[in-house]
Image: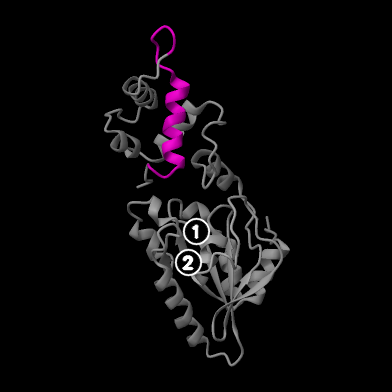
Amino acid sequence: MKQTIPEAVNHVITSSDIVLCVLDARFISETRNLYLESRIKAQNKKIIYVLNKADLVRNIDQKELDNLSPNVIVSCKTRNGVNELRGRIKIISRQLKKTSPVYIGVIGYPNTGKSSVINLILGKKEIAKTSSVSGFTKGVQLLKLSEGIYLFDSPGIIPATERFTELVKLAKIGVKTFDRTENPDLFVHELMTQHPGVFERFYDIDAKGDAEKLIEEIGRKNCMLLKKGEIDVERAARMILKDWQSGKIKAK
């Protein structure tokens, strides 16, 4: 079935010479949109893959990086990669050999950090406001990166696919809702299935992939007990989710 492109995203693609595709470094494949990438290339636009939130990942699979060229790994939190990203933009801009200004567009799924990447590039937080709410950026602004190079600050938010919605539900990208999650023990189980060994290494508990065992050990170590001395499973599971959502537990 043919996919449709929201007007705002289509505007970013058609109006830009270079498109920054912002991906979550923890979930690269899930935050790519191959259909949009093909549309960008079909219009002879240049792509730079920006792998954001690198501070939440220990290692990035080299095989995935090989399929993303050119790419820049950044962290808006630590500002790592900002100089490389700016330099990459300027190099490609010069290669275009345009006599008129070069325009840069930015697209990405909700909560991958599109607006934060814009701020990182510009180095001025007050120019492009950020928010944890998806699609916060409204309207269209033209932001000057350097002489002859401009960024479109437009809402290039890619609508979430079913898989991405599931991913957000499980991993809570940029959303702090550990205290409101229903059945937190089931979420811990799913996360441990997706990231084998990660939680055991973080807590130094040999759970062998068994979420129930991990939760019980966490509850016992932190004295999370009910009136009859039983482990408070829900409270312990929420603590694990809190550590995951806050970035204490690294994806890889």
Q: Nearer the viewer, residue 215 or 220?
A: 220
The disc labelled 2 sits on which kind of residue? Tyr
Q: Is residue 4 above or below residue 242?
A: below
Q: Residue at x 43, y 51 (%)?
A: 26
The disc labelled 1 sits on which kind of residue? Leu
In this picture, residue 208 sits left or right of residue 152: left
Q: Nearer the viewer, residue 145 or 19?
A: 145
Q: Position of residue 128 (x, y in %)?
A: 60, 65
- Its colouring scheme is one colour
Residue 244 highlighted magenta (yes or no): yes
User: Which of the numbered marks, if any, corresponds to residue 49?
Assistant: 2
Q: Magenta stretch: give its range.
A: 226-248
User: Which of the numbered marks, if any, corresponds to residue 23?
Assistant: 1
Q: Position of residue 203 (x, y in %)?
A: 31, 33
Q: Is residue 189 in view from this perspective?
A: no
Image quadrant where residue 98 sits? bottom right
